[in-house]
Image (cartoon, helix red, strand yellow):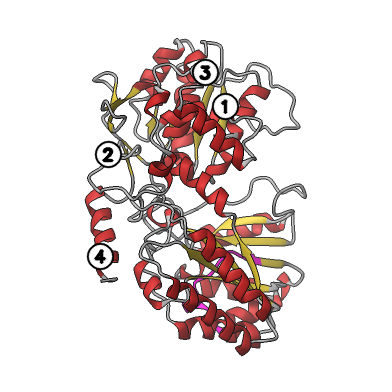
């Protein structure tokens, strides 16, 4: 079912599903469940309550903070997994909820949280998350779609975040493997549908409804036929359409690309540089030179674009103040080189993500001052700086790094989850045992780690992590090697 705050309760739905792409959207699940009069805790649901399922990057990476609220998690790509899940639900209608979940939990790619139990040491250290019976696998692997088509918009509406745009997924994952990047590591392997059978039909379908096309992907210009796609879109009979692109890799920007984008109504170019420091770009495996950054901006300027936006990160492991100075210095030179272009820096704080080589590194408190420093240095130079909230990056890390002991905190922050103070107050109350009236099953709130431990501390690679029973695209020992290689290069 699809639902939002404007929907009235549906009559006796069998399924209630949500896809989460951002950690901070997680608590919305509880609001939606209450609106539909569905018990928020999975163990309170009866046979006639719908099966609550979820998917998307957040739940595939680390489902544990929301595990007590969800009956079923679909891990990875949904192209085959979702139809298979729905087909199984149809066959299991006559069984009890417990029996249905037991059968679903044995299907590859389907994780049933209630069939797994966390084990803790006396000090609260997570020791393992284990199945409760021998029929359930010890770990669950994400599913990977290898078909020749990816996703595109099914609903086009003026009320969307990007109104009246038909979105087409050009690639999935990214071959560059930046060490912090969930979109790359979690969704491997890199996939690109063919132009003739995948991309062209998807674009043509959208053009029957709208004149606005958005091309999406972590690294769309690395599609092997991207130049051909632009040539096809540049045909005269497409005059009148407006084309939008997600962030592109600076080293792939060409003069021809910019001319097509300008011809198709594109106003700006977005590139991710991560840092103006060559040392930091090497740390994160960003294979991008300063020359390539300036060349991309030069093409954008000469091709008639109005603006260029660059993405950066502060608070990376081993980062120093000199690296922040290098970012400011590079952007000031870039602005002076292309004064006609409006230059914007979107900058965020590093947040550790599961299944990436930097999952063991915490949020660095000095990132807050470094965001402020960049803003102070760059705004007087005519550069628009749009920093993401450091405070909300902290909450994002709390949700990305915690286990299911965070669930009572999420439940108790309802109504104030848009308040940073509300999160901190709920967490502190849980640590003091003041949420014991919450229906938490066997969750011991007094074993909650400290705020500092979950958010800011760096962890040993030997530590059992809340998502160790969820198998990603790259094995744990490989992630450890990628982390060691990144840090070795900084010595």
> In 3D space, how far apart are the residues under numbered discs 1 and 4 (Cα atoms)?
41 Å
Q: What residue is rendered at 35% in x and 72% in y?
A: 282
Contact flag, marks 3 and 1 (Cβ < 8 Å): yes
Residue 1 location in percent, x, y? Answer: 62, 30
The image's mark for residue 485 is: 4
User: Residue 258, located in which quarter of the rendered image?
Assistant: bottom right
* Residue under numbered circle 1: 412
Secondary structure of residue under mark 1? helix
Asked if one can make out residue 85 in the rendered structure from this viewpoint, the answer is: no
Which of the two discs, 2 and 3, sits closer to the camera?
A: 3
**Does label 3 or label 1 sit earlier along the sequence?**
1
Q: Which residues are magenta?
A: 244-255
* Residue under numbered circle 3: 438
Secondary structure of residue under mark 4? helix
In the image, 187 versus 237, the foreground residue is 187
The image's mark for residue 464 is: 2
**Does label 1 or label 4 sit earlier along the sequence?**
1
Mark 3, Cα crowd under 10 Å, few <14 / some 14-19 / many 20+, is: some
Which of the two discs, 4 and 3, sits closer to the camera?
A: 3
> In 3D space, how far apart are the residues under numbered discs 2 and 1 (Cα atoms)?
27 Å
> In 3D space, how far apart are the residues under numbered discs 4 and 2 (Cα atoms)?
21 Å
Mark 1, Cα crowd under 10 Å, few <14 / some 14-19 / many 20+, is: some
Q: What residue is rendered at 70% in x and 51% in y?
A: 161
> In 3D space, how far apart are the residues under numbered discs 2 and 3 (Cα atoms)?
27 Å
Asked if one can make out residue 286 in the rendered structure from this viewpoint, the answer is: yes
Vertical placement of residue 10 versus 273, above or below: above
Secondary structure of residue under mark 2? loop
Residue 464 forms part of the magenta stretch: no
Contact flag, marks 4 and 2 (Cβ < 8 Å): no
Q: What residue is rendered at 37% in x and 41% in y?
A: 142
- Judged left or right of residue 52, residue 303 is right
């Amino acid at each position: 079912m699809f639902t939002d705050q404007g929907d009235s309760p549906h009559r006796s739905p069998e399924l209630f599903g949500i896809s989460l792409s951002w950690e901070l959207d997680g608590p919305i699940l509880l609001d939606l469940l209450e609106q539909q009069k569905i018990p928020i805790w999975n163990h309170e649901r009866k046979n006639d309550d719908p099966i609550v399922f979820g998917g998307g990057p957040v739940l595939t990476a680390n489902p544990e903070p929301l595990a007590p609220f969800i009956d079923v998690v679909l891990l990875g790509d949904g192209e085959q997994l979702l139809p298979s899940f729905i087909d199984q639900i149809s066959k299991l209608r006559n069984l009890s909820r417990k029996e249905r979940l037991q059968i679903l939990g044995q299907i590859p790619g389907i994780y049933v949280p209630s069939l797994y139990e966390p084990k803790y040491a006396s000090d609260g250290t997570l020791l393992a998350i284990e199945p409760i019976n021998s029929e359930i696998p010890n770990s669950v692997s994400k599913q990977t779609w290898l078909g020749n088509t990816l996703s595109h918009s099914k609903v086009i509406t003026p009320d969307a975040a990007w109104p009246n745009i038909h979105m087409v997924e050009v690639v999935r994952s990214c071959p560059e493997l930046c060490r912090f990047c969930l979109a790359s590591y979690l969704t491997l392997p890199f996939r690109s549908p063919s132009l003739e059978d995948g991309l062209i039909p998807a674009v043509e379908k959208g053009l029957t409804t709208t004149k606005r096309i958005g091309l999406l992907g972590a690294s769309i210009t690395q599609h092997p036929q991207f130049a051909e796609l632009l040539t096809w879109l540049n045909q005269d009979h497409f005059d009148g359409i407006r084309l939008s692109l997600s962030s592109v890799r600076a080293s792939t920007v060409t003069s021809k690309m910019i001319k097509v984008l300008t011809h198709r109504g594109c106003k700006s170019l977005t590139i991710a540089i991560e840092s103006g420091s060559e040392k930091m770009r090497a740390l994160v495996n960003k294979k991008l030179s300063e020359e390539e950054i300036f060349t991309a901006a030069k093409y954008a300027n000469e091709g008639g674009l109005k603006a260029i936006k660059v993405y950066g990160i502060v608070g990376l492991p081993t980062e120093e103040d000199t690296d922040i100075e290098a970012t400011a210095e590079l952007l000031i030179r870039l602005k002076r080189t292309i004064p006609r272009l409006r230059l914007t820096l979107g900058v965020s704080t590093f947040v550790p993500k599961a299944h990436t080589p930097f999952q063991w590194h915490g949020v660095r408190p000095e990132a807050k001052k470094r965001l402020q420093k960049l803003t102070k240095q760059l705004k007087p130079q005519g550069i628009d700086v749009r920093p993401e909230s450091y405070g909300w990056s902290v909450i994002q890390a709390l949700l990305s790094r915690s286990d299911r002991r965070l669930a009572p905190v999420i439940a108790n922050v309802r109504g104030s989850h848009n308040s940073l103070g509300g999160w901190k107050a709920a967490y502190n109350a849980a640590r003091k045992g003041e949420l014991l009236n919450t229906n938490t099953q066997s969750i011991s709130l007094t074993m909650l780690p400290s705020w500092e431990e979950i958010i800011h501390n760096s962890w040993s690679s030997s530590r059992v992590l809340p998502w160790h029973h969820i198998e990603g695209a790259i094995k744990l020992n490989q992630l450890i090697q990628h982390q060691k290689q990144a840090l070795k290069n900084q010595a």
